[in-house]
Image (cartoon, grey):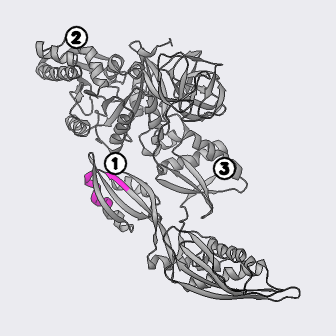
Amino acid sequence: MKDYSAPDLRNFAVLGHASAGKTMLCEAMLACAGRIGRMGSIAAGTTVSDYHASEKQHQISVHASLLHLEWMNRKFNLLDCPGYADFISEGLGALRVGDFALVVINAAHGLGVGTDAVWDYAAHYGLPKMIAVNALDKANVKFDDIVANAREHFGKNVFPVTIPLNAGPGFSHVLDVMRNEIVTYAPGGSGTYKETPAGALAEKVQQLHKELIEYVAESDDTLMEKFFEKGILAEEEFRAGLHKAIQNQVFVPLFAVSAETNVGVARLMDFIAKYGSSPMDRAEVPARDAAGVTGSVPLAQPEPVAYVFKTMNEPGVGELSLFRLFAGNIKAGDELLNSARGVTERLGQLYLLNGHDRAAVTQLHAGDLGAVVKLRDTHTGDTLCSPKQSVTLPRVEYPAANIHGALKLRSKGDEDKLAVGLATLHQEDPTFHYRVDDEIHQTIVSGQGEIQLQVIVERLLRRFGVSVTLEEPRIPYRETIRAQGESRYRHKKQTGGAGQFAEVWLRIEPTPRDSGVVFTQSLVGNNVDRVFVPSVEKGVQSACREGILAGYRVTDVKADFFDGKMHPVDSKDIAFQVAGYHAFKESFQAAQPCLLEPIFNVTVTVPAEFVGAIMGDLSARRGHILGVDIDGHFEVVRAQLPQKELYHYSTIVRSLTSGRGRHAEAFSHYAEVPPEFALRLVADAKARRENGNGKTAA
């Protein structure tokens, strides 16, 4: 492949709701460009993009795959992104390094929540958008309805550049508005076509063509004046204005395609080559210098600056870092500074990627995307730059986790391998998090969805040889009191040797929520030596850690050690620890004890027709509905829900909304457990103690 400079590069992310057909659209583009002899299929696991074991197993995209091809003397760098929200980090990383977004809509399914989400993300990065309406070879598709819906969601400036003439099974004819031609695609998925004048459709085309010129004129005051003056624009004015109109989003081109049969794809590629964004359209990107001062990095500067948007481990290769070069040129052997970590990295072999296939190159130029192997300490989100000019590019901001699970090792002794595996997978996917929770004694993993966590479990086994099961996390219930309580506990132990004696008088009372455990002493006189106060506190804190009612941590209690008794010989540290421990337990039981549970704020974003089903399900889960808001063309149900009811909730939302809804959650507060549930938890704890298993598992 020849070297391409920035004006001839087309870097774009291919995004959309799940099952929109993004991977097959990329496959069709590769076939059109001759990069592959024939198109693969999702079912057979033979597409260029979906080459990882997890993608073949689940038959969905899990990774953003970097692909490249040549078309009309332009180099396309495509990033085929997963549609499932579980893997949103992949799409966000791709948008960070793309120059525009190609949003794919399945004509048979319509717009989903994911369509709006990726549109909003692209808008956040200031990227122009194009739309491909896919699967027009399926039965009962209504192109006009999709266009109307897209305009309703994304604005009246959405404009069909190509229109299907025989949508449905056998779809092969596309009307090209810009060229006033009917394009007929050959059967067999080759992407080849022939053109004929629009003929009987000439009047329709002329009307659409006039609308298109008006959009272009709107993007430039000079063109608008010429348009009003002459009623038409010259060809060169029109084409130059079209690119500007797309950049300003005055005009959002929409294309009719069928990826599986490769109909309409070549014309889409023609348009991208001629009018799509290049790195020249974002010739400066924001950055911070070594002192933290905000500035920018110009594309034309000689010193290299690269952003690593993805890291992954490839069998037989090791760690592969995918990056975009925002300025300068680089070649294998160059030494660059990782400004985020303060370490230098010597670049290994540079590659261009087509999924799993790697083509070695000697150098890369500003604006291009590539990959490098075996960087020592560089991870997703890091900036590599010239040591002469240290800068840091903004990192992607990833959404908070909204699903959690607990990992259980199948084999003892694999703890170290598990720790290494979890750390590596977090570095590769920043939306995946893990922690060892000392309160519930479990390793908790968190992410964007159930499929993501299942894929993590599969990777741990495949890559690190660690076999784990994913189970429901224990709930960190808490114990507290509603009233005051008091105890006078005497600990007396007499054996053959020295005895033990301590008497502790303890008074407890409730404190405000989230205040923890407060220990005080109000001793007067000389009944107890003050040296034993820390001993009593140790006993109280020990009882609080163990729990009294059901084995959960105690909180929101003030314990006051107000009197007691001691023995001149037998009183010692351990005696007062034991007395403090039991005094607290006795007083706790006398103070109307109760259980608390964590409550989460939950938002569920769904199309209007699913609001009733979501609200009904939330109510059945002990949820408290806070309200319903409008968010664009979707409705957002706000509620508070006990953590116990949130396990697998993302799957429930997908099931209730035909895959078109999504939810987010965040911890809010602790609240008292309803009496009927509390009785069950206490009974379960009693049964565990009687069975000799004191660990809490709820």
Q: Amino acid at mark 1?
A: Arg
Q: Residue furthest front?
A: 525
Q: Judge depth for marks 2 and 3 and give the one in front.
A: 2
User: Would you say 288 lies left or right of 693 here?
Assistant: left
Of residue 651 and residue 389, the one placed in the foreground of this image is: 389
Distance between the alpha carbons at the discs numbered 2 and 1: 43 Å
Which residue shows up at 28% across the image and 57% down it? 628
Within the image, what quadrant is residue 474 found in?
A: bottom right
Q: Secondary structure beneath disc 2?
A: helix
Of residue 114 and residue 258, the one placed in the foreground of this image is: 114
The residue indicated by pointer 2 is 235
Image location of residue 315, percent across then percent down = 63, 33
The residue indicated by pointer 3 is 418
How many marks the image carries: the answer is 3
The residue indicated by pointer 1 is 660
Q: Is residue 595 visible?
A: yes
User: Would you say 9 lies left or right of 462 here?
Assistant: left
